[in-house]
Image (tube, rainbow, N blue to C red):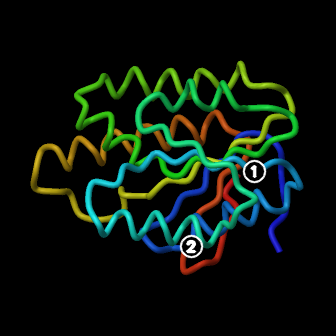
Amino acid sequence: MSTFHAGVSLILGGARSGKSAFAESLADASGRRKIYLATSQAFDGEMEKRIDLHKQRRGPEWHLLEEPLALGQAVADHAADDACILVDCLTLWLTNLMMAERDVAAACAALVEGFADLPEGASVLFVSNEVGQGIVPMEKMARDFRDHAGRLHQDIASACDHVWFVTAGLPQKLK
C-alpha cells in the first residue's frame, strides 16, 4: 500500500519500471479528486493503444486533461487543496517541446519556478523516465534530450518535497 504525501513529488524510473502504476497508487491513497494530466500525443496506432491501456487501468474516477506543451500553466490552473494531479510524463513533455522547437530551458525553469505559487495543500505527482544511466547517445538530438531530462530532474528533485525511484515495480524513496 502506498502512503500519500501532499506537496510536489517526482517519481523516476526506467521504461516499464512501474513508475506510473506507483504514482497512480499514491493518487488513490490521497483520497482526493484525481486529475491525470497527460503530456503524450498519439501519433500512431501503437501509441493510441498505450494510451487506451493507461486509461483502462486508471478507471473512470480520473479526470483526464491533455496538455503536450503548456504544462506549467495546466498544473497551475488545476492545482487545488482537494485534488491530486498526476503528470505523466515529463520526458514526453520534453520531447514535445523539442519537436515544437520551443525554448526547453525556459519552459523547464518556468515549470519549477511555478511550484512556489501552488496552493499550500496542493498535491502534484510528476512521473518521468530516468534516461541518464545508459550510454551516451550517438545522435545530437538524443544527447540534447538526455541533457534536458537530466537537468530537469535535478531541478525538480531539488525543489520538490518527495522523490521516488521505481525499479521492477519496487519504489525506493530518495527524498
Measured as percent of width and height from the top left, residue 80 is found at: 80, 32
Q: Quadrant of residue 58?
A: bottom right
- The residue most toward the left is 139
Above or below — where is 57 with respect to 29? below
Q: Residue at x 76, y 60 (%)?
A: 26
Secondary structure at numbered mark 1? strand
- The residue most toward the bottom is 168
Q: Is residue 80 left or right of residue 152?
A: right
Label whose residue precedes the other's in the sequence (1 or 2): 2
Q: Quadrant of residue 156?
A: top right
- The residue most toward the front is 60
Q: According to the image, label 2 marks what residue?
A: 18
Q: Residue at x 63, y 69 (%)?
A: 21
Three-letter amino acid code at the position of disc 1 = Lys
Q: Is residue 104 left or right of residue 173?
A: left
Q: Residue at x 80, y 62 (%)?
A: 28
Q: Nearer the viewer, mark 1 or mark 2?
A: 1
Above or below — where is 163 with respect to 28? above
Number of marks in picture: 2
Measured as percent of width and height from the top left, residue 157 is found at: 59, 42
Q: Residue at x 12, y 44 (%)?
A: 140
Q: Quadrant of residue 144?
A: top left
Above or below — where is 69 with respect to 42? above
Measured as percent of width and height from the top left, residue 30 is found at: 85, 55
Q: Indicate which disc residue 60 carries.
A: none
Q: Is residue 119 left or right of residue 162?
A: right
Q: According to the image, label 1 marks what residue?
A: 34
State the CA–CA distance, disc 1 to disc 2: 19 Å
Q: Is residue 38 left or right of residue 171?
A: left
